[in-house]
Amino acid sequence: MSKCCRECNTIKPLSDFNKDCTRSDGHQRICRPCTKLYYQTWRNSITGEKYEHIRLNSQKWRADNKLRLTKIEQQWRADNKEHVKELNKQWLNQNGTLYRRSHKAIINARNNERRARKLNATPKWFNAEKKKIQALYEKAQRLTFETGRLHHVDHIDPLCSDQICGLHCLNNLQILPAIENMKKGNSFKGEI
Ligand SMILES: [Zn+2]
């Protein structure tokens, strides 16, 4: 399905038009880029006191209608799944590396939690320790940054080795320089 945008006179797929339940085809008359341009021009044309008045009013309205807005946004996301996917992809392409770098500790903690869950190595009290464990991964990242030497969060008893399956919990975690962690591998040196 496609339709012609009333603003730029271009025939575009229906997915390029915002939803509008008051229209017979359920979509606005002008396409997304034209809508965006329209609002940008409108916004730029307002200055000074008038701008401040609108800004404060809209801020108040948002605060008063938080729940309603969340519902509208959820509905919009559900109605525009493909568009949201595309927007996320674009954002990740532009900010992905930066995002991954600044969230490395969080990603590491999450990956290790997932790995531990797969191995049934998360104890019952894991959720109570979750924040402290996250902080440990952040500390390892900070040490890496401060010393210039890569640091890992290591499982003292490995999650999976021939002799023992350690737990993913605070008592079994330590920060090690990566080189020592790699030397250690999955070996278990204690006595069972
Ligand atoms: Zn258009």
Image: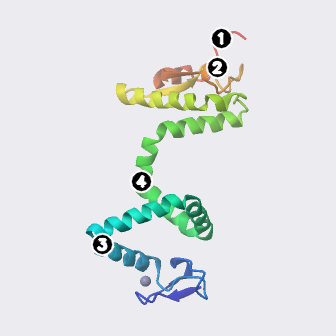
Instruction: Note whether 192 is above or below 118 in the view shown.
Output: above
Mark 4 vs 3, N-terminal side = 3
Q: Nearer the viewer, mark 1 or mark 4?
A: 4
Image point 30% across, 72% down: which residue? Answer: 44
Image point 51% across, 30% down: which residue? Answer: 135
Q: Amino acid at mark 4?
A: Asn
Q: Nearer the viewer, mark 4 or mark 3?
A: 3
Q: Which residue, given by chain and number where applicable, does mark 1 sit on?
A: 190
Q: How many angstroms separate mark 1 from mark 4 (CA)? A: 44 Å
Q: Which residue, given by chain and number where applicable, does mark 3 sit on?
A: 44
Mark 3 surroundings within 10 Å by alpha-carbon count, few (fewer than 14), some (14 through 19), many (20 or more): few
Mark 2 vs 4, N-terminal side = 4
Image point 33% across, 76% down: which residue? Answer: 41
Figure quarter occupied by ligand 1 = bottom left
Q: Identify the residue at the far left of this view.
A: 48
Q: Nearer the viewer, mark 3 or mark 2?
A: 3
Mark 1 surroundings within 10 Å by alpha-carbon count, few (fewer than 14), some (14 through 19), many (20 or more): few
Percent position of residue 158, x then y: 64, 23
Mark 3 vs 2, N-terminal side = 3
Which disc, if any, is residue 157? Answer: 2
**Front residue (pair 31, 148):** 31
Instruction: State the SS at label 4.
Output: helix
**Front residue (pair 35, 186):** 35
Mark 1 vs 2, N-terminal side = 2
Q: Which residue, given by chain and number where applicable, does mark 4 sit on?
A: 95
Find out whether the residues at labels 3 and 2 contact each other: C-beta distance under 8 Å: no
**Front residue (pair 192, 65):** 65
